[in-house]
Image (cartoon, rainbow, N blue to C red):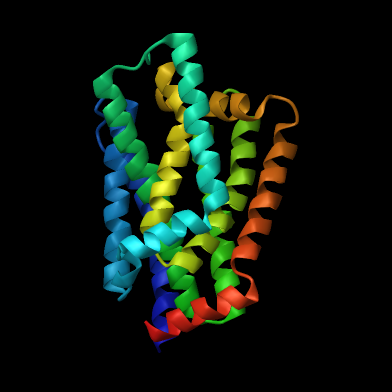
Amino acid sequence: MNKTKYWIGIILFIVSYFATAILVPMIPSTGDGVVDYMIHSIIEVAIYIVFLLAFGLKKALRFNIKSCGKGIVVGGAFTAWTVFNIVFYLIKGIKEYGTPLMGTKDIIIFVVAITIGAGMGEEFLTRGVLFNFIRSAIGNTKTGIITAMTIPSIAFGLIHLFNLNGCSDPTPIYTQVIYAIGIGFFFNALYVRCGNIWVCSILHAVFDLSLMLYFCIFRNTGLSGIGSTVAEWLGYDALILKGIAITVVSVAIGLFLIRDSKLQKCIERYENE
């Protein structure tokens, strides 16, 4: 009966997600796309939290300094990549623009919006709800956990199709969808290892902001520059192949993080919760 509860929860959540995707955009616009995105994200995060609490998964929201630190260390390659991006694009932005073209107030709103929308929204959706519901429905076995990692990873990639809205060239967005599947798998592996969704939220938000620092903040393109951000970041040639390469590497690292010797300890942790 316990597993049946989570299967029912998955169905209810899918219905809720699509209903939200239809209804939330109908909220009157503030006239500022970033503020609208932030408001919509807050509503979505609240719904995800309600689902977790309603189905007895409040432990998915726990925060622990030790496990957070472990997550940053375990995700060392991704952490290093993020730090490199911040330093590189900060220097590039200062050299080319001096100071960001985006105003201070708008920068603060932008950072908060990305932190809530990408850092919390996407992580609470894929890792918080989907991973935990699927794992609980299938069971704490190797097959169950890998399945629970794979399905949310695909979902994580597909939700980036929303970025096609207003995009003149779809290729960068398709590339984003592809590499997001791989990065999503890596984040799931990181979540399995550290058991702390907040470290995934922090790394996710900071990584996104590290790329947007130059392309969106210094240039002041805001969220409208997502397509060009992906293209310029990776280079315009062979975008799809580069997206596939990122996915292959990310999945390989993810599988290494959950190798049998490590996964068994994680399974034991889940069984003791």
- Find the residue positioned furthest to the bottom: 1
Looking at the image, residue 225 sits to the left or right of residue 55; the answer is right
What residue sits 29% from the left and 61% below the top? 49
Measured as percent of width and height from the top left, residue 229 is found at 54, 26
Looking at the image, residue 199 sits to the left or right of residue 35; the answer is right
Total numbered labels: 0
| Quadrant hosting residue 7 | bottom left
| Quadrant hosting residue 255 | bottom right
Q: Is residue 20 above or below residue 262?
A: above
Image quadrant containing the C terminus: bottom left
Measured as percent of width and height from the top left, residue 161 is found at 54, 41
What residue sits 31% from the left and 64% below the top? 64
Q: Is residue 244 above or below residue 59?
A: above
Q: Is residue 261 above or below residue 231?
A: below
| Quadrant hosting residue 264 | bottom right
Q: Nearer the viewer, residue 3 or 248?
A: 248
